[in-house]
Image: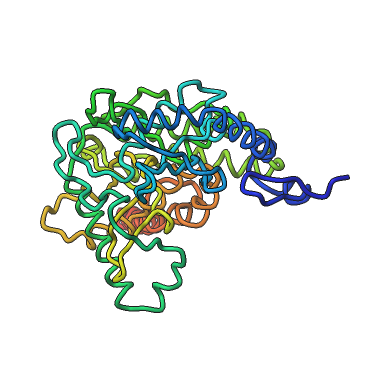
Amino acid sequence: MITSLPLFKGNSISLEDALENDNNILYQLDYPQQKKEFWLYLLLHKNGIKDLVCFYLYAKHYQVTNEAYWLFGSYNIYIPVYIDPPSEQVVLVRIPLPFKIGEAFNPGNMDKKLQFAFPNGLTFAEVSSTINSLLGFLPNLLRTRYIIISLTTYLLENDSHRQTFFRDLANIIITLNCTRLPYIGSLTLSDNGVISVTNWPLTLRLQTFKNKGIPTIPRALTYQAIEPYILDLLQCHDNHIYYQPNTIHNTNDSQEQFAALTMIHGLLYQFVSRQYHDKPFVLILTDLHPSNIFVDEDWHIISLIDLEWAYTFEEQEKRLQDPNAFQAQIMRQYWDSGSFWYFQATHSPKGLLSVFNEHIQHRFCEEHCTQQAKGFIQKKVEEEKEYKDRLRKRFDNVG
């Protein structure tokens, strides 16, 4: 019997590890062959790639690099194309991998992903006529030299660079929080060059569901309030359990998962205020992986890439009523209230159970009545004792 089988990135997995893995490994075992087939398809269409570059950049001469220089990412392939060789000017043609974005189950996903992926390496000039230079920290990657972050441990060893980096990151988040958008959804670039919130909130995890044939949110659906989005998101969790063949390991595991999912449903209004549940919303960056952040020699953030998983959402810390509160204070209250962990659980298919057990469940009594329920129940027990004492005294005083 074969001891291991290849996976997408050239690594392999043994049967023992595959059986213990919570992911659907059967899908992943098909990726190497699908990758090879797509590679051959692109080789046959190199002239089409050259024509595409010529059309958009008005280049007279161009050359697609040898396939040895083509780069495979997790969801895209990057093909370098030289402009007017022997000039060193080069562009990267980024093409989504159809077998990683659910094209087989949902034809048209590639087109939608290209529309979602518009911010990469660009500046926002306009979003629904309301955002001006929103992401000024996304200059053209081809005109400036960058250092890509590869080892986050380096930040722990250099205080100056760490402070610079996190100060810039905080400024980016604050800048995003200052711009309000009308719906929960994804920013989309239309054929006419207009950027707007017109498609469902495409997160990395929901895209993973799509790729495995698990029903999620319809493409064109956006939300004007938090509750329907969270409820649809939790329906995706239900679908994940129902459609993926290895989500339930045993009876106890199923009971724990269903109990946690039921409680997450029931606790919605413990963490979402009915008074502050609707628009406006803000742009959330969900894939701030170190390899997507470029810095200069002093570790100032110069550019962010791979923003196709960014979407608009209402983080509850933006809804505190004190307009003069510092962002740090707001985020601390968001953390202390447990809202951070609640939204982490709703957005994490594999992590919902563990996040619920470790960070949410302890905030409630065994019956999960209300926040700080144990203290409330103790107070009511003492009130009843006092009531009965008073009642006894009334009866005693009658004589």
- Picture coordinates of residue 32, whole percent (x, y): 66, 39
Is residue 301 or residue 213 the one in the foreground?
Answer: 301
Is residue 183 or residue 113 the one in the foreground?
Answer: 113
- What kind of colouring is applied to the model shown? rainbow
Q: Residue furthest left?
A: 324
Position of 123 with respect to 34 (left or right) is left
Is residue 355 or residue 380 the one in the foreground?
Answer: 355
- Picture coordinates of residue 237, whole percent (x, y): 52, 35
> Residue at 34% across / 45% down in the picture?
271
Residue 377 visible here: yes
Where 149 sits versus 206, above or below?
A: below
Q: For the C terminus, which image quadrant?
A: bottom left
- Picture coordinates of residue 131, whole percent (x, y): 16, 39
Callout count: 0
Position of 263 with respect to 249 (left or right) is left
> Residue at 55% across / 23% down in the picture?
105
- Picture coordinates of residue 8, whole percent (x, y): 63, 44
Residue 392 visible here: no
> Residue at 29% across / 30% down in the picture?
189
Residue 375 lies in quadrant: bottom left
Q: For the N terminus, which image quadrant?
A: top right
Q: Residue furthest front?
A: 86
> Residue at 71% across / 46% down in the picture?
6
Where 359 sits versus 74, above or below?
A: below
